[in-house]
Image: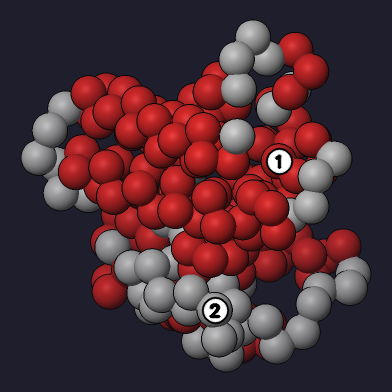
Amino acid sequence: MRKQPVQQRSAKRVEQMLKACAELIDELGYDGVTTTLIAERAGVAVGSLYQFFPDKRAVVQALTKRHLDHFTSQIDKRLDWEHLEHWWHGVDTIIDIYVEMYRTIPGFSHVRFGDVIDIRLIEDGRDNNSVIAEQIAKVVAGKNNVPVESLYRQITVASDIGDAILALAFRRKLFPEEDMVNEAKQVVRAYLAGQMYRQD
């Protein structure tokens, strides 16, 4: 963003722009969206949009960061390690949150965490999957009082495995969604169980 909204009125305008962008992405896809369309849908002048965002990519970047914040906050809110019957229920919860976002959050199914537009959309210099894995690792490490570094590699691999399997249903549409959700859970659990066995 060119600048952060300070006043409540400005923050509301930015919210309207992000909401409009998400709706338009669902309707037209990323390539069909323009800054003019975003401004029109948001009910603001295009010059007002340019006060905060230099281009469409920047609007989608802000929307993607919002998606990531929602994802990690939901993991933090819903992962209760002390009361989990088995550790793999935590894996299931994280995958369920992702699937819920895919099905319910406007714009998410088209841009996800930005890889459709740029593999380094969230942060310059780091690919999106690495940023996401680090955020998950921070939440899980905080819940278990262990160093982030001890989980980062396994969670990075697990995230990429899960994403690749879910892509077969949601992006490539080769197999039924529920089958692939269950497959992702089983394969990620098996990988992490193997990592635990190796450490023992």
Residue 185 location, quadrant = top left
Q: Nearer the viewer, residue 179 or 25?
A: 179
Residue 64 screen position, x and y as percent:
54, 63
The amino acid sitting under disc 1 is: Val
Residue at the far top in the pictured view: 85
Taking the image as shown, residue 135 lies to the left or right of residue 11, namely left
Q: Residue at 66% across / 36% down in the picture?
A: 75
Mark 1 and mark 2 residues within 8 Å of each other at the beta carbon = no
Is residue 18 in sight in this rendering?
no
Q: Position of residue 54 (x, y in %)?
A: 57, 90
Q: Quadrant of the C terminus?
A: top right
Residue positioned 89% across, 73% down in the render: 6
Where is residue 44? Give x, y as percent. Answer: 60, 72
Q: Is residue 102 above or below residue 20?
A: above
Q: Quadrant of residue 65?
A: bottom right
Q: Is residue 81 above or below residue 136?
A: above
Q: Dot 2 lies on which element? A: loop
